[in-house]
Image: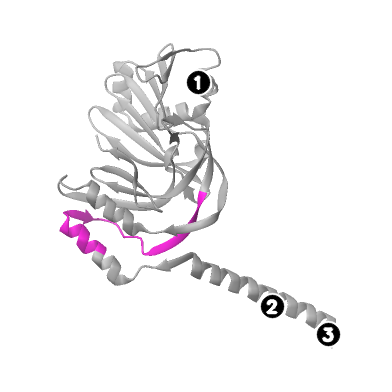
Amino acid sequence: MNWARVKTILIIVFLVVNIFLFFEVSEKYSSKVIKPEEISDLKNLLVANDIILETTLPSQIKFLPRMKVTNRIIEENQTADKILGTNKWIVRSNAKDMPIYFSENKQLKYDKFGFIEYTINIGKDEASKLLSNEIKAKQTINNILSKYLKLEQYVQNEIKVNKTAIIIDYSYFNEKSEIFNNCIVAKILSEGKIVIKHGLIDYNGFTSKSKKVTPVDAIVELIRVLKDKGKTTIKEISIGYYAELNKANEIVRFGEADPAWKIKTDKGTFIFDAYTGILAASFLTE
């Protein structure tokens, strides 16, 4: 018998088994299942507060790290060059002392939360043509965005169409993690404008320590936020990351994104810090 070969095979087998056990143990301690009775209590609490659940409640408490991010919105002139064209703009400040960049029929402005709003005046006739042709409207928005964004990292969601607007929104993913700050909301308005709002956040790795992430606190806080707002329907609950980019009323270049719950309802979308359950942002339905 070739004992050297047998020894090598046994080492490989033990190595494979150890790797398997490592991942099994890691999975066991990286999350735990919420008890069925706890899920039932949450559902009853929602019903008692006139909130209808049209999706599945997350059934696990996970342990996730913070994400390190860079905020490219802070590079105002460089961003304006990229979107409007190099040296093809002038800049002024609004009443809140935030910069607004102008270039012919285009405008680029920033808000205190780290988002840009890009407006293109296309005229009512062109807007009317786009509103009557959903495929052309989608292609027009994609053509605009692809000039300065890598759209392969975005996933287009549903298109909302009414008499006065077409609204197309996109979610942004870094590998498997959605970064909520990088979502895009693009609107074609019957008044003759295209308005696109989004963030520009870059992923720079994770911090080493993971903390507990539970949906329970977020659900309880959602109930408080929606109090006295009438019957509400929860359409979707997902986990991702949201960066707080405003520190002491100033936009920061480098920061951290905490895990966050995104809860979509018929009243709007609400984002809650997944460590604390505190409301981080809300986007109400127009």
Q: Nearer the viewer, residue 38 or 7?
A: 38
Residue 127, placed above or below residue 263: above
Whether 54 is among the magenta residues is yes
Q: CA distance from mark 2 to mark 3?
A: 16 Å
Mark 3 vs mark 1: which is more N-terminal? 3
Residue type, mark 2 in image: Phe
Q: Which residue lies at the image location 42% right of the left edge and 33% below the top edge?
A: 248
| Residue 241 circle label | none
Q: Which residue is mark 2?
A: 14
Q: Which residue is mark 1?
A: 80
Label 3 close to label 1 by CB (< 8 Å): no
Secondary structure at numbered mark 2: helix
Q: Which residue is mark 3?
A: 3
Looking at the picture, how far across and down is residue 34, in whole percent?
Answer: 36, 68
Please state the total of marks drawn on the protein image.
3
How busy is the neighbourhood of tag 3: few (under 14 within 10 Å), some, or many (20 plus)? Answer: few
Secondary structure at numbered mark 3: helix
Q: CA distance from mark 2 to mark 1?
A: 57 Å
Residue 272, placed above or below residue 77: below
Residue bounds of the magenta highlight: 42-66
Residue 98, placed above or below residue 23: above
Coloring scheme of the render? one colour
Identify the image quadrant of the N terminus. bottom right
Residue type, mark 3 in image: Trp
Residue type, mark 1 in image: Ala
Looking at the picture, how far across and down is residue 134, in whole percent?
Answer: 33, 32
Looking at the picture, how far across and down is residue 170, in whole percent?
Answer: 41, 39
Foreground mark, 3 or 1?
1
Q: Is residue 147 visible?
A: no
